[in-house]
């Protein structure tokens, strides 16, 4: 039976394998890009964080501020991304085998991975920034 079905199913199997491979690479590249953008945005706030710490802000308040800003950007990006994914899924529905273009598990998993990467990317620089000496930040002014 495998020999009988092997030839007619070769093209759909190859298409599914290529689509899966490209989508995983796209997810990895978007995670790397998201980390770079969020990390850069948080690092640009190092001077502001130093001033806030010099004025008596607590480290947890600074973390909350940076993560809140990051979460608002990530939330807007996730909303736009889900809408675009739903539209693209409708366009590519002929290429999807065994998965609906509106698969909530796939969308939720990809969104969760990118949100976690974005929050991690914002947390690490904010953590480093709260460890610097506020006097050094004020001297660089």
Image (tube, helix red, strand yellow):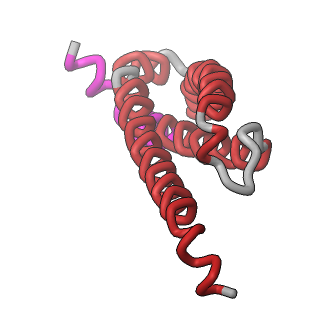
Can residue 123 be seen in this snapshot?
yes
| Quarter of the picture holding the N terminus | bottom right
Magenta span has 38?
no
Of residue 126 and residue 115, the one placed in the foreground of this image is: 115
Q: Residue at horizontal 40%, vertical 45%?
A: 29
Number of dots carrying numbers: 0
Query: Would you place residue 31 above or below residue 78 in this image?
Result: below
Classify residue 100 as left or right of residue 122: right
Can residue 58 be seen in this snapshot?
no
Q: Position of residue 87 (x, y in %)?
A: 64, 24
Q: Residue at horizontal 67%, vertical 22%?
A: 83
- Magenta range is 123-140
Of residue 124 and residue 104, the one placed in the foreground of this image is: 104
Q: Position of residue 138 (x, y in %)?
A: 29, 17
Q: Position of residue 106 (x, y in %)?
A: 70, 48
Query: Would you place residue 115 above or below residue 23 in this image?
Result: above
Of residue 103 and residue 38, the one placed in the foreground of this image is: 103
Q: Position of residue 135 (x, y in %)?
A: 31, 25
Magenta span has 124?
yes
Classify residue 129 as left or right of residue 105: left
Q: Residue at horizontal 67%, vertical 44%?
A: 112
| Quarter of the picture holding the C terminus | top left
User: In which quarter of the view is residue 125 placed?
Assistant: top left
In the image, farthest residue toward the top? 141
Please identify the dominant SS of the magenta region: helix
In the image, farthest residue toward the left? 140
Q: Residue at horizontal 46%, vertical 57%?
A: 18
User: In which quarter of the view is residue 114 placed?
Assistant: top right
User: In which quarter of the view is residue 88 placed?
Assistant: top right
In the image, farthest residue toward the right? 104
Query: Would you place residue 1 above or below residue 126 in this image?
Result: below
């Amino acid at each position: 039976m495998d020999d009988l079905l092997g030839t007619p199913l070769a093209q759909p199997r190859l298409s599914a394998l290529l689509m899966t491979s490209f989508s995983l690479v796209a997810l990895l590249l978007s995670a790397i890009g998201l980390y770079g953008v969020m990390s850069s945005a948080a690092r640009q706030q190092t001077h502001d964080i130093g001033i806030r710490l010099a004025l008596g802000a607590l480290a947890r308040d600074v973390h909350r501020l940076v993560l809140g800003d990051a979460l608002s950007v990530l939330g807007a990006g996730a909303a736009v991304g889900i809408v675009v994914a739903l539209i693209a899924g409708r366009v590519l529905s002929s290429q999807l085998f065994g998965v609906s273009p509106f698969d909530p598990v796939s969308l939720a998993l990809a969104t969760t991975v990118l949100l976690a990467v974005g929050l991690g990317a914002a947390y690490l620089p904010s953590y480093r920034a709260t460890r610097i000496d506020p006097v050094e930040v004020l001297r660089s002014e």
